[in-house]
Image (cartoon, grey):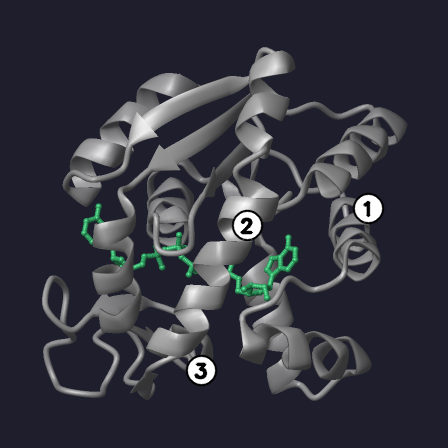
Amino acid sequence: MNLILFGAPGAGKGTQSSLLIERMGMTQISTGDLFRAAIKNKTDLGRKAQEFMDRGELVPDLIVIGMVEEVLNKGVKDFILDGFPRTVAQAEALDELLKKMNLSIGKAVFLEVPMSELMDRLTGRRVCRSCGAVYHVKSKPPKKDGICDLCGGEVYQRQDDKAEVIETRLKNYEEFTSPLKAFYKKAGKYVEVDGNRSTEDVFSDIRQIIA
Ligand code: AP5
């Protein structure tokens, strides 16, 4: 089944996607990760995206949609869309793309986490620069400070995980992304999962949804 995983910044989309890849063999399409890779590789796409990301703003719809179309054209299956769509315009464009490609989305899973918890998750998050593994200074620190348990890469804080940028991201989420709940309810694909529990409990719910 193809899945949309959506929710506020820090809701746990990346964490759950990693488990779905590892345990269910699914493929993650994370627009945030794709942009970060483009920035690292200093491509045109990366240069365009970076100015928006550093400020916590959304990258313009046309750029994002074009990038997702390119990935879907490679013929992925059992995919998780993580961080896309993030506006109603993106959701409508996705519907068009999927129709054209004869693909469909089974469920749009919304991870519900209260705002008070999100700030703590985001300010405490650390990420491996090489493999993208996600840590948290309190709840999931790497065994050796600053070094990834999995690949030995450098564990760093994302530029957009600074408190002042997080505020902008959360505001943009409320304005542009939360209307997707109504969009997917209307489409009959919406499922809500309480994301404010242990990673394993959240995963167990998602696994049941896609079973
Ligand atoms: P993106 O990388 O997608 O960021 P995001 O949506 O803000 O989501 P995050 O990666 O911050 O959070 P997450 O939900 O994946 O949480 P995680 O699992 O890491 O996008 C970055 C930027 O790119 C955007 O701001 C925008 O500029 C641009 N962009 C991307 N897509 C776009 C689009 N479609 N349109 C326009 N612009 C776009 O977990 C967070 C922390 O919490 C971690 O430390 C983790 O260990 C911890 N944690 C996770 N689960 C739990 C749990 N159950 N209990 C306790 N702690 C937990």
Determine if the C-beta at disc 2 is less than 8 A from ligand 1: yes
For discs 1 and 3, the disc positioned in front in the rendered view: 3
- Which numbered circle lies on residue 83? 2
Ligand 1 has an atom within 8 Å of the beta carbon of the residue at disc 3 = no
Task: Name the residue at 84% across, 25% down.
Answer: 99
Query: Residue placed at 77% from the left, 40% from the top?
Result: 89
Q: 7 or 151, which lies in front?
A: 7
Tell me, yes or no, if residue 108 can be seen here: yes
Give the image location of residue 119, x and y in percent: 27, 61
At a point 84% along the width and 56% down the height, the residue shown is 62
Against 66, is 124 above or below?
A: below
Residue type at tag 1: Asn
Q: Is residue 39 above or below residue 78?
A: below
Please give left or right for residue 192 compared with residue 143 in the image. Answer: right
Q: Earlier in the sequence, mark 1 or mark 3?
A: 1
Residue tagged 1: 73
Q: Quadrant of residue 97?
A: top right
